[in-house]
Amino acid sequence: MKKSIFIAETEIEKKIFLIRGKQVMLDKDLAELYGVKTKALNQAVKRNLERFPHDFMFRLTSKDAFSRSQFVTLKKQGKNIKYLPYAFTEQGVSMLSSVLKSKRAILVNIQIMRAFTRFKHLILNHKEIVEKLNTLEGKVENHDTEIQSIFRAIRDLIAKNETQKRKVGFCINQ
């Protein structure tokens, strides 16, 4: 019997952030999804650092971490952060499944990769929609000027007709 692990799409999507212009997931969120401790995940990564170049993974700076308070939450208030979290790009997340080597890691990884793909499609669709709106806005602006010129022409015709009114009907000379 094949064991399946299902994590709601929205749960994964909530854990994808845009940091330094890249879509990333944080070590603590990935550890939670994979069902391991953050420390264990980071140790596995450190044992395999050659698999994680800077475009696959980077450590957040204190500026990154504190400007995004939802990323770094302390267990006890007043406790200092000992280690800043790692951020993994899509390629880094993909590499994690080969480092963790568990069935759960593989199954969760498939769901995460699908979430990243959905995000890419949303971004592409968003760009297309923005381009179409810009085109439509340009057309509407052109139509506005064209419509205004039509109204001006109609007003001119009305004004011309009022000045050139002729009396219509029979005149009786007395």
Image: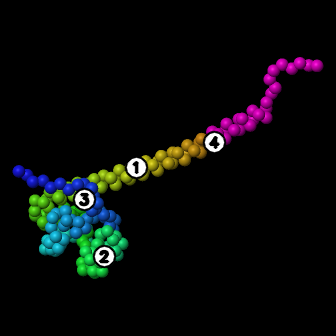
The stretch in magenta equals 150-174
Quadrant location, the C terminus: top right
Q: Tell me the amino acid under the disc marked 3.
A: Ile
**Residue 164 lies in the magenta stretch:** yes
Contact check, label 4 and label 1, Cβ < 8 Å? no
Q: CA distance from mark 1 to mark 3?
A: 25 Å
**Residue 170 lies in the magenta stretch:** yes
Q: Which residue is mark 4?
A: 149
The disc, 4 or 2, on the residue closer to the chain's N-terminal end is 2
The disc, 1 or 2, on the residue closer to the chain's N-terminal end is 2
Where does residue 26 sit, x and y in percent of width and height?
25, 67
Q: Residue at x 51, y 45 (%)?
A: 139
Q: Which residue is mark 3?
A: 12
SS at badge 1: helix
Where does residue 47 sit, x and y in percent of width and height?
13, 74
The disc, 4 or 1, on the residue closer to the chain's N-terminal end is 1
Left or right for 111, reference 20: left
Q: Residue at x 50, y 48 (%)?
A: 137
Q: CA distance from mark 4 to mark 1?
A: 30 Å
Mark 3 surroundings within 10 Å by alpha-carbon count, few (fewer than 14), some (14 through 19), many (20 or more): many
Contact check, label 2 and label 3, Cβ < 8 Å? no
Q: Residue at x 43, y 48 (%)?
A: 132
| In the rendered image, the vertical position of residue 5 relative to residue 50, given as above or below | above
SS at badge 4: helix
Q: Tell me the amino acid under the disc marked 2.
A: Thr
The disc, 1 or 3, on the residue closer to the chain's N-terminal end is 3
Contact check, label 3 and label 4, Cβ < 8 Å? no
Mark 4 surroundings within 10 Å by alpha-carbon count, few (fewer than 14), some (14 through 19), many (20 or more): few
In this view, the mark in front (2 or 3): 3
Q: Which mark is residue 129?
A: 1
Q: Which mark is residue 61?
A: 2
Nearest to the observer: residue 109 or residue 21? 109
